[in-house]
Image (spheres, grey):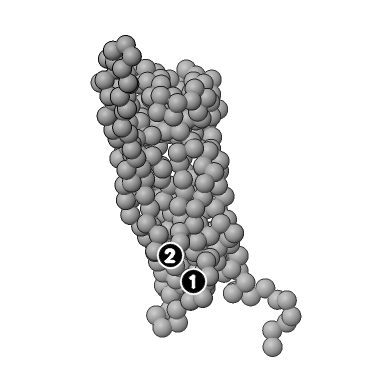
Amino acid sequence: MAEENIIQESSLARVREIEFVSAFAGSIGKLMEAIGVTRKVPKQAGAVLKSYKAKGTLASGDVAEGETIPLSLYQTEAVDVGEITLKKWRKAATAEAIIDRGYDQAVDMVTDEMLRDVQKTVRKDFFDFLGTGTGTASGETFQAAIAQAWGQLQVLFDDDAVPCVYFMNPLDAADYLASAPIAMQTAFGLSYVDSFMGLGTVILNSSVPKGTIYATAKDNLVLYYVPVNGADLGEAFDFTSDDTGYIGIHEAADYANMTAADTVVCGMRLLAEKLDGIVKATIGA
């Protein structure tokens, strides 16, 4: 019988799982704080994600003296974004690979790289969604384009104090950043700058097309996610997660083929509630 409280391999596996989950949750938490996301909505069974866009017609403003001013008709229209899908990934290291390269290189280092790739997948989905925004702006220079985007947001959200967030390609901002005394920070694999030019928070990532700036109000962003630590999944599967339930991992040895396998699940979508509240500003148009 093993000595009481002895550290066994199974205990170390759970520690590795907790480190994996904590690294992801801490990183996404910093990003949510940076871009001001306060609404985090867990998926309910059967729920469908929706965004909204406004449309309508402005009535003529030429009204004769004493006549009734005609009404302008506007309405919001729901746009189905789709359902959140639980994405699943798996990797396995053979016994031979562990013997040849050592456990740290064959399993742990690869798991860290897997975490980075999962983050890339979540980021790409978000930037692809930003590209569906319907607001537009343009400026001859980088500074002019971001200023025009800021101006459009003030009109769209009818508030000159609305907190804004901008997403852009690092190459578009490089010239400005070279001469500006700013402090760059990182979160979830993204670089960002607070109070950029006094206009809001800027997120820099190469997933944004060069020559384009995505901008929206921070209050327009919502995080939807499948809680992987929810009761339904928890009844069938044993995933290590944290209180957020953003991501789960299970590490196990498969003796049938002598591999150390990791299964990772994550269902997250960072969306904007109003599509017309996303402004796509073009530089040099």
Mark closer to the chain start, 1 or 2 = 2
Q: Pick the quarter of the image with the N terminus.
A: bottom right
Label 1: state its secondary structure. helix
| Whether residue 252 is situated above or below residue 113 in the rendered picture | below
Q: Position of residue 69 (x, y in %)?
A: 32, 21
* C-alpha separation, residue under disc 1 versus residue under disc 2: 10 Å
Residue that lies at the very extreme toward the front in this rendered image: 66
Residue 166 visible at all: no
Label 2: state its secondary structure. loop
Residue 199 visible at all: yes
Q: Is 263 positioned to the left or the right of 64 in the image?
A: right
Mark 1 touching mark 2, by CB under 8 A? yes
Q: Residue at x 52, y 24 (%)?
A: 161
Q: Pick the quarter of the image with the C terminus.
A: top left
Q: Residue at x 42, y 33 (%)?
A: 216
Choose between 98 and 178: the one closer to the eye: 178
Residue at label 1? 232
Residue type highlighted by circle 2: Ala
Q: Residue at x 26, y 20 (%)?
A: 60
Residue at label 2? 45
Q: Residues within 10 Å of mark 2 (few under 14, many from 20)?
A: few
